[in-house]
Amino acid sequence: MQSLFETPYIIELLTPKQSDEDVETRLETFAERYQRILDAGAVVSIPDNPMGTVHYTALEVIDYLDLPVDTERTLLHLNSFHLKSDLDYFLNSAQSRGVKNLLIVSGDGGPRLPRLEPSDVGIDTKTVTSVALLQFIEREYPGVFTCGVAFNQFEPADHELQRLARKIDAGARFVITQPVIGEDAVVASLSDFGLPVFIGAWMSKRVELLLECVGVEPSVDMKYEPFENLAQLHQVYPEYGLYLALLSFKRDWSDLLTRPVPWTPGA
């Protein structure tokens, strides 16, 4: 299985919310963290209005701060909660700036977020799914973007694996899972698809937030140590990359990002 980014690590970084106070300070912090991720040899991954909360877009923040765009190590998320004009602007701007890698997700809605109409992407269905969005990008921007998709191992396995197969048929070229806790047989089976896989690593002790997001009832006596879990993921899944969410920028990462760059999966 080839390494998509020649690095085993993707690190998530949120842009400021539009409701944030002291946005200038938050933008300065974003710029520092953005560069730190690149300096660590990792991919910087920027979500698109996560949890339905309106954030400044990745491209407008990158432009405002005049940040470098590393073609191989920048991953922008794109969901279906946009106007068609915004979708076109995002894709055209990403192309002009040399952004190659996109993570296509259905996304979470909110009262301030419009949703793409099926006619916007040339389909005749009730809603625009990640599959439809993938098909649109593959059709309208052939060969421009390398698109990945999400995989939720907390959903019923047969259903989610079938959905993944449809996403791959629509053009998906890599997979990022929900955060994984320990060994997971469904996650292990993703190697059968022959695509690069990055498994989620939840780097906060507040595991109840993760379980709430994925609809799992947390155990009363459940204890979770993110660094111990990351070490286990390193050991159990040597052929998979890792997607680190809620990683602290207040600590040194040398004992966490232990795989070499460039990276050979399984080595």
Image: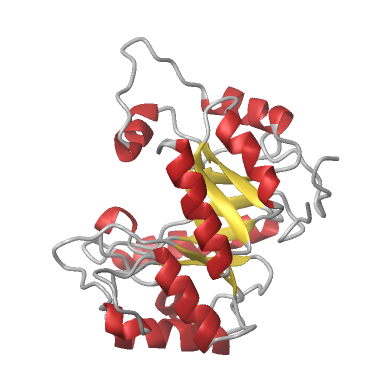
Colouring convention used in this rendered image of the protein: secondary structure
Residue at image location 51% in from the left, 60% down from the top:
166
Q: Eyeballing the image, is 89 above or below 18?
A: below
Left or right: residue 132 versus residue 111 is right
Residue 185 in the image: x percent, y percent? 59, 29
Residue 11 in the image: x percent, y percent? 56, 51
Residue 118 in the image: x percent, y percent? 29, 78
Q: Can residue 95 be seen in the rendering of this structure? A: yes
Q: Nearer the viewer, residue 168 or 85?
A: 168
Q: Across the whole image, how many numbered discs are drawn on residues?
A: 0
Left or right: residue 125 versus residue 37 is left
Residue at image location 58% in from the left, 54% down from the top:
175
Q: Nearer the viewer, residue 130 or 25?
A: 130
Residue at image location 48% in from the left, 89% down from the top:
92
Q: Eyeballing the image, is 98 above or below 254?
A: below
Q: Quadrant of residue 24?
A: bottom left
Q: Can residue 58 be seen in the rendering of this structure? A: no
Quarter occupied by the C terminus: top right
Residue at image location 42% in from the left, 82% down from the top:
90
Residue 123 in the image: x percent, y percent? 34, 80
Residue furthest to the left: 111
Residue furthest to the top: 221
Q: Eyeballing the image, is 86 above or below 54?
A: below
